[in-house]
Image (cartoon, grey):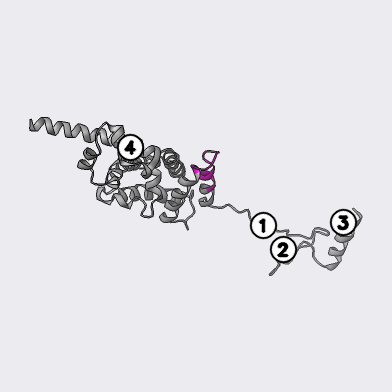
Amino acid sequence: MADQLRADARRNRERVLAAAQEAFAEAGLLVPLDEIARRAGVGAGTVYRHFATKEALFQEVVADRIQHIIAEARSRSADADAGRAFYGFFAWVVERASFNHAVCDALEMEEGIGVFRDQCSEADFNDAFAVLLRRAQDAGAVRTDVDFDDVRTLMAGCVGMERRRRVPGRMVALACDAIRPSVTEPERRNETCEICNAPLKPATTGRPARYCGSACRQKAHRRRKTG
């Protein structure tokens, strides 16, 4: 009899977790515990026997999703293209969180995913994601003045904004563009006068010189007026 009771308890717990995973994915923390019990086909008392609070059940459900995300980050770290690995993971997380309110709520929490420290998810997630960031920066694919907190904040912001946008991926694209190294073409400088081709003296201040002196400058001005 005791074995049967334990087996029944395990099955009920599994049913509660499956129902909670579905409900939290649809509505996040806003879903009532009674609704989870209804979906699981058990009474609210059964849910409370396994999980003292809705928050405890939420943590259990999301911890499993976070572990899946960690595994994805680790697998991408083997990609020879460090930039592709980092930006691909960033977009992958945002896309999935946008359709899973539970993960979205976890990433947007003030504590981040720190609420899952008991399962070591916080440290594992940070370590796996930080590896992708460091590799991308070493490869010149991410600005070196961007730190891990910047990226985590951008990711959380993108999750919330993507859910409100009609064009999927738009916010991710803008955020990723913001942390890519900017490539500025060097300003082109003339080495000779545009009128007489005489060598120009380097300008110490202001805009680069275009003419060797006032005579050529006036000649250029007359040409523009008549041209």
Q: Amino acid at mark 2?
A: Pro
Task: From the viewer's perspective, tell me whether residue 169 is left or right of residue 38.
Answer: right
At a point 77% along the width and 61% down the height, the residue shown is 210
Q: Amino acid at mark 4?
A: Glu
Above/below status of 20 relative to 138: above
Q: Amino acid at mark 1?
A: Glu
Q: Mark 2, mark 4: which one is toward the viewer? A: 4
Q: Position of residue 75 (x, y in %)?
A: 35, 39
* Residue nearer the viewer, 55 or 146: 55
How far apart are labels 1 and 3 at the CA level?
23 Å
**What kind of element bears circle 2?**
loop
The residue identified by callout 3 is 224
Q: Earlier in the sequence, mark 2 or mark 4?
A: 4
Q: Earlier in the sequence, mark 4 or mark 1?
A: 4
The residue identified by callout 4 is 35
Evaluate whether residue 77 shows in this view: no
| CB within 8 Å, label 1 to label 2 | yes
How far apart are labels 2 and 4 at the CA level?
71 Å
Q: Earlier in the sequence, mark 3 or mark 2?
A: 2
